[in-house]
Image (tube, grey):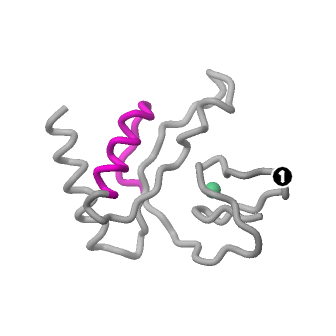
Amino acid sequence: MYCVKCGKEYGEKLKRCCCGGRLEKGPPKSYRELVEIYSTWKNVEAGFLKSLLDSSGIESYIHNLYYPSIVPVGTGAVPIKIMVPADDAENRERAEEIIKEHVRNT
Ligand SMILES: [Zn+2]
């Protein structure tokens, strides 16, 4: 089983990767390099931004959304990250604009 988002390999029994990606059988089909455009500790905010990007037709991914629940507090907690494909400059620029706008309004 492979994560469709980050390409990490897993055993047969798991359904989700630590990055929140779905696991599928076989080798990763379209593993793409992602870059972080925003990070937050609030999963509500991450989900909201993802839906904003989705509704604008911008491809984006959330990393570490489920991380805080599987790692004991204080052992290197990591923020939730919003990622976009590194090879799509236009997509990335628009995503950054939307996030900037969001940050200005909060
Ligand atoms: Zn993953």
Give, as a three-letter code, the residue at label 1: Lys
Residue depicted at x 15% and y 39%? 104
Residue range of the region highlighted in magenta in the rendering: 36-54
Is 5 drawn above or below residue 63 in the view shown? below
**Quarter of the N terminus within the rendering:** bottom right
Q: Is residue 75 left or right of residue 82?
A: right
Mostly what secondary structure, the magenta segment? helix
- Compared with 56, 91 (above or below) is below
Image location of residue 75, percent across then percent down: 66, 26
- Left or right, 75 with respect to 25, comes to left
Q: Residue at x 43, y 61 (%)?
A: 35
Mark 1 surroundings: few (<14), some (14-19) or many (≥20) residues within 10 A: few
Horizontal relation, residue 22 to residue 43: left or right:
right
- State the residue lying farthest toward the front: 55
Secondary structure under tag 1 reads loop
Spot occupied by residue 22 in the image (x, y as percentages of width and height)? 63, 57
Name the residue: 40% across, 33% down.
44
Q: Quadrant of residue 26?
A: bottom right
Residue reaching furthest right? 12
Q: Which residue is mark 1?
A: 13
Numbered disc total:
1
**Quadrant in which ligand 1 is drawn:** bottom right
